[in-house]
Image: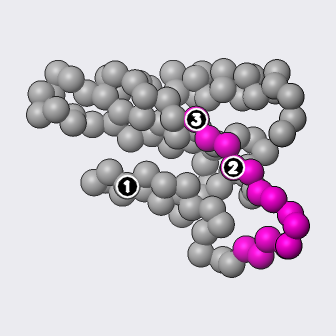
Amino acid sequence: MTKLPWADFSGDFSGDSNRMSGAAVFVSSDHPDYPPTWMTRHYGVLAVGWPGVKAETIPAGKSVSCRYRIWIHRGTPEVPEIQSAYDEYLKGLSNRQPR
């Protein structure tokens, strides 16, 4: 279990190795227990693991919001490119009105 602000899964989904693609899941910085833990597997599972294996009690009358962005891409971007897209996502959130 690793705490990360984003995770990416890329692969050959068409059977043509020249057509690599994938998706990254970005987590908003106001996410509970940010950055969250992830469940990732080489065969394609990519999931935010909140609240994880420890129980989380949400008091009556309190709401929880979890915002994510899915960034779909062609090819296999390097970490700096994904991080740049994530940074743009966070910038966009900071320019929005609070929920």
Q: Which residue was labeled with disc 2?
A: 66
Given the image, on which type of amino acid does mark 1 rest?
Val
The residue nearer to you, when weighing 99 against 15, is 99
**Quadrant into which the N terminus falls:** bottom right
Indicate the quadrant where residue 2 lies. bottom right
Residue name at image x 43 percent, y 28 percent: 72
Q: Which residue was labeled with disc 1?
A: 45
Q: Is 65 one of the magenta-colored residues? A: yes
- Whether residue 77 appears in this view of the structure is yes
> Residue 7: where, in percent of width, then height?
51, 43
Element at label 1: loop
Given the image, on which type of amino acid does mark 2 rest?
Cys
Q: Which-is-in-front pick, marks 1 and 2? A: 2
Element at label 2: loop
Residue name at image x 73 percent, y 22 percent: 92
Q: CA distance from mark 2 to mark 3?
A: 10 Å
Indicate the quadrant where residue 68 lies. top right
Q: Which residue was labeled with disc 3?
A: 69
> Residue 73: where, in percent of width, then height?
40, 24
Residue 56 in the image: above or below residue 14: below
Residue name at image x 25 percent, y 27 percent: 20
Q: CA distance from mark 1 to mark 2?
A: 19 Å
